[in-house]
Image (cartoon, helix red, strand yellow):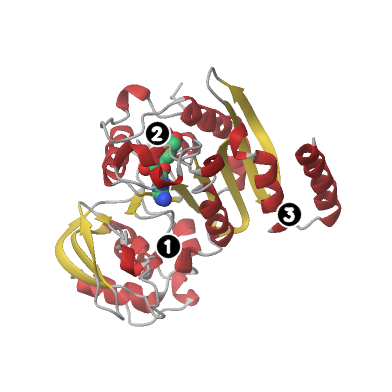
Amino acid sequence: MHSRTAKIALVSSHPEVYEPCDDSFALVDALLADRTNLLQHHPSICMEIGCGSGYVITSLAVMLGHEGFVPYYIATDINRHAIRATRETMDAHGVYTELVNTDITSGLEKRLAGSVDVLVVNPPYVPTPEDEVGCEGITSAWAGGENGRSVIDKILPAADTLLSEKGWLYMVTLTANNPSEICLEMRKKGYASRIILQRSTEEESLHIIKFWRDSDSELELNNLNYWTKLVMN
Amino acid sequence: MRLLTHNMLSSNIKGVANGFPLKIEVVTVVEKEVEFNIEFLKKMFSKVEWKALAEASRTMGYTELPENADASMLDSDDFLHKFHHALLELHLEEGALVCPETGRKFPVNKGVPNMLLHEDEV
Ligand SMILES: C[S@@+](CC[C@H](N)C(=O)[O-])C[C@H]1O[C@@H](n2cnc3c(N)ncnc32)[C@H](O)[C@@H]1O
């Protein structure tokens, strides 16, 4: 059987680039578990923000297949070494992604608004002093500022702009990021959400959350109550 | 960088109102063959800003695209193949994208546009 994810041995590495780690594996496992839905979803445009080594976007491209209808894959990273690593990882797997060296999705939001069907993000989520956020090199791969939310809180509005009517967002969060509050924020923008994978490692407890636009008001209310309860507790 | 991506990029400099389309300065163009898929092309046709694509492909040395296009042309095989070639197979490998309003250049190296801004541009 063909492998359904990127092969670790073929993932490019560089001292300044985030190596695939528990969070990357959790995200890819969550995508793999949702693969049947993703195939039915038939995305035209798939995007990753902060592609690092390229492990996640390459895995997505591998699991969705690269024959016949191939979506437009586009990935961004603020770190140029990560962009180069992603290029090498993709090449090693025979898949293709367009790459843009930019902050979040700056420069793409105007024209790609309402067009992205699948957006995947493993953001820098570790709580750190604010001045470590977005600095040169490897620190920016994990430094998330207060509660690890600095970059996440910029990604959420960008995601809302970019996602199509049927768009799905998959995002990694840590307990310290207050995932239930993130879901509430997104609820206010009209998104339903579900934790599709939860994994505790020695150091951290990771949640992979899936978001989708949801106009069903009844459901909306139920979820809101549900999340409010979680936040209260 | 494919012209599809060029078509999705605009100048992100603070205060710029009309940052699209970015002008292309060509140093190197490469061509890479891509599997032809009609369904994909039809989906992308509705997202692409045609004039920007036609102009960009001319700048890259490909002059086969018509000045204007509408959805009825998607029935023509000849048109679809030209659209396919311009959209997906022509890559700007080295060069720059130029903000139409300020003239600021965003470099493209090894096929990757650098849209990172300086502090005073954010
Ligand atoms: C936790 S790593 C994840 C890397 C890879 N996606 C993975 O799962 O292994 C976060 C990535 O986001 C990038 N990043 C951090 N801040 C960013 C920003 N403001 N815009 C774009 N990318 C950013 C980092 O360079 C890093 O590659």
The residue type indicated by label 3 comes to: Asp
Query: Are discs 2 and 3 both within one chain?
Result: yes
What subunit carries mark 2? A
**Would residue A183 appear left or right of A150 to someone viewing this image?**
right
Residue displayed at 28% across by 77% down: B55
Q: Give residue B108's position: percent from left, percent from top.
A: 22, 59
Q: How far apart are marks 3 and 1 (CA)?
A: 24 Å
Residue occupied by mark 2: A55
Q: Is mark 2 within 8 Å of ligand 1?
A: yes
Q: Distance between the residues labelled 2 and 1?
A: 22 Å
CB atoms at circles 2 and 3 under 8 Å apart? no
Q: Which secondary structure, mark 1?
A: loop
The answer to which image quadrant residue B85 occupies is: bottom left
The residue type indicated by label 2 comes to: Tyr
Residue occupied by mark 3: A214
**Would residue B98 appear left or right of A150 to someone viewing this image?**
left
The residue type indicated by label 1 comes to: Leu
Q: Which secondary structure, mark 2?
A: helix
Q: Which secondary structure, mark 3?
A: loop
Residue occupied by mark 1: A108
Q: How far apart are marks 2 and 3 (CA)?
A: 30 Å
Task: Choose the circle earlier in sequence order: 2 or 1.
Answer: 2
Q: In this view, does A205 lie above or below A221?
A: above
Res. A74 visible in picture: no
Residue at the extreme top: A202
Residue displayed at 39% across by 43% down: A132
Badge 1 density bin: few <14, some 14–19, many ≥20, Cα 10 Å: many
Task: Choose the circle earlier in sequence order: 3 or 1.
Answer: 1
Q: In this view of the protein, which residue sits in the foreground, B62 or B37?
A: B62
